């Protein structure tokens, strides 16, 4: 027998036996359509030596509950305001959402829930459909691999970072929509593609990065238009949440979506991101209480 590789030696079980290759993956009796889907995707997007790690973590147990439930909740709130609240047209909602207790209003910043709840309110069909499509297309695959806790943490960090960034850099503007959370998923997905580029088939890696850049650039263009040219409902709608969300995704999302083989609490990048986020949170609270021109 040949010598045992040091990395293989570390994987011996409690009885000193080496586990069989693929022991952590489902056997033929446990396979389902989801496993077949992940195996097909791994063959398409990953080199052979990088597939094993992906397949050990990717499965449908549990299913992508978080991103589906948050999408249903956002759609339900939109339908509520479109059907039961007064407005001039439901294609682009106006006074009903600006008066909503969920909308982030800089004049009502003491109602702290608004820093999160604005994600449930959308300004029209284009707004809600765009956000739902993007967060489902990005969130479901991410949650199948990284699970609901990680995706939920990144998404909510983007939502909070979006409203806090808006309160600092665009302090007089109202804020609606889930763009902060969606952009956090985009930022995390982008960093995942950059960091793991060498583990992917090069052409696919370039495609993923360029796709995110194209989507972000196009959406930022529309956001600037809505902010500086088209003042919906007579109010200035902030675009800064996009920036806050994508920064949250490229920091916290980078850790949650990229560290496949490291213990999260031992990863210094995790603590750098957490400390940085806490410092930003403390500064934002201080700014809103003592400095903000919206006071």
Image (spheres, rainbow, N blue to C red):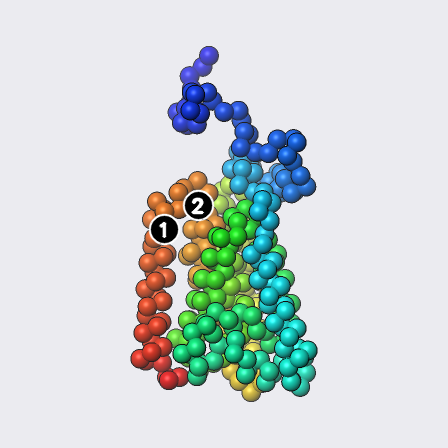
Query: How packed is label 2: few (under 14 Cα within 10 Å), some, or many (20 or more)?
Result: some
State the residue position of label 1: 269
Q: Is residue 45 visible?
A: no
The residue lying at 33 percent from left, 76 percent from top is: 287
Question: Helix or strand or loop: what does disc 1 sit on?
Answer: helix
The answer to which image quadrant residue 217 occupies is bottom right
* Residue 46 percent across, percent down from the top left: 57, 40
* Residue 22 percent across, percent down from the top left: 55, 30
The residue closer to the viewer here, 105 or 213, is 105
Q: Quadrant of the C terminus?
A: bottom left
The residue lying at 48 percent from left, 69 percent from top is: 116
The residue closer to the viewer here, 199 or 116, is 116
**Do tag 1 and tag 2 residues touch (Cβ < 8 Å)?**
yes
Residue 259 numbered mark, or none: 2
Does residue 85 appear left or right of residue 145 in this picture?
Answer: right
Of callouts 1 and 2, the N-terminal one: 2
* Residue 142 percent across, percent down from the top left: 55, 51
């Amino acid at each position: 027998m040949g010598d045992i590789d040091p990395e293989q030696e570390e994987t011996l079980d409690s009885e000193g036996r080496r586990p069989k290759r693929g022991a952590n993956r489902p056997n033929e009796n446990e396979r389902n359509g989801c496993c077949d889907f992940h195996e097909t995707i791994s063959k398409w997007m990953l080199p052979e030596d990088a597939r094993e790690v992906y397949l050990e973590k990717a499965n449908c147990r549990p299913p992508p509950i978080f991103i589906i439930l948050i999408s249903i909740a956002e759609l339900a709130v939109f339908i509520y305001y479109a059907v039961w609240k007064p407005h001039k047209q439901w294609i682009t909602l106006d006074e009903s959402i600006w008066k909503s207790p969920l909308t982030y209003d800089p004049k009502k910043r003491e109602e702290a829930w608004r820093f999160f709840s604005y994600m449930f309110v959308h300004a029209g069909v284009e707004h809600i459909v765009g956000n739902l499509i993007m967060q489902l297309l990005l969130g479901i695959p991410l949650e199948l691999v990284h699970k609901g806790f990680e995706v939920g943490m990144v998404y909510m960090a983007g939502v909070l970072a979006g409203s806090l960034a808006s309160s600092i850099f665009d302090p007089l503007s109202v804020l609606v929509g889930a763009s902060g959370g969606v952009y956090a998923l985009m930022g995390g997905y982008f960093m995942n593609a950059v960091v793991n580029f060498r583990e992917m088939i090069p052409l696919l890696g370039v495609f993923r990065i360029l796709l995110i850049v194209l989507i972000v650039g196009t959406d930022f263009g529309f956001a600037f238009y809505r902010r500086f040219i088209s003042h919906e409902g007579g109010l200035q709608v902030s675009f800064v949440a996009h920036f806050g969300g994508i920064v949250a995704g490229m920091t916290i999302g980078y850790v949650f979506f990229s560290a496949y083989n490291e213990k999260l609490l031992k990863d210094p990048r995790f603590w750098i991101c957490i400390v940085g986020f806490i410092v930003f949170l403390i500064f934002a609270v201080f700014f809103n209480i003592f400095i903000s021109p919206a006071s």
